[in-house]
């Protein structure tokens, strides 16, 4: 599905780019060419029944996820971290207000 000029205007706005008419036309041509050459052939590949991989090397051998246990740490670690904070209260960092 090719992009339309309105799509390019929206993308440029989101990227905070100012494109004149010629630049928008060139960008539209280039992005549509990319979709035609790269994205559409990838969409044509039949992926039914293919399980997603957590890691690309999982194809070669079984790789368990390396997740650490979610356990509470010693209070000494919290106190050590808070010792470096400019301000803390009740075991929490105090930060300046940024939203009015």
Image (cartoon, rainbow, N blue to C red):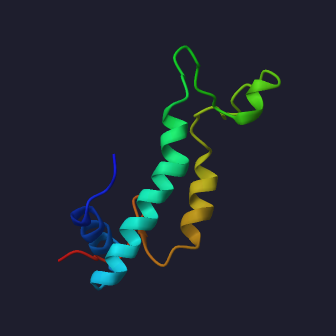
Q: Position of residue 95 (x, y in %)?
A: 37, 73
Q: Residue at x 51, y 31 (%)?
A: 44
Q: Nearer the viewer, residue 11 or 80?
A: 11
Q: Is residue 14 left or right of residue 90?
A: left
Residue 7 quadrant: bottom left
Split into 4 quadrants, where in the image is the N terminus? top left
Q: Is residue 54 visible?
A: yes
Residue 94 quadrant: bottom left
**Outermost residue, left direction?**
100
Q: Position of residue 13 (x, y in %)?
A: 27, 74
Q: Nearer the viewer, residue 18 or 78?
A: 18
Q: Position of residue 58 (x, y in %)?
A: 74, 27
Split into 4 quadrants, where in the image is the C terminus? bottom left
Number of marks present in the image shown? 0
Q: Is residue 63 visible?
A: no
Residue 67 quadrant: top right
């Amino acid at each position: 599905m090719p992009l339309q000029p309105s799509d390019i205007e929206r993308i440029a706005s989101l990227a905070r780019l100012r494109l004149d008419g010629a630049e928008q036309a060139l960008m539209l041509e280039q992005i549509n060419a990319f979709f035609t050459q790269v994205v559409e052939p990838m969409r044509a590949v039949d992926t039914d029944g293919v399980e997603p991989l957590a890691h690309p090397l999982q194809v070669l051998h079984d790789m368990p996820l390396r997740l650490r246990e979610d356990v509470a740490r010693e209070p000494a670690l919290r106190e050590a971290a808070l010792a470096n904070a400019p301000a803390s209260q009740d075991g929490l960092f105090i930060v300046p207000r940024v939203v009015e």
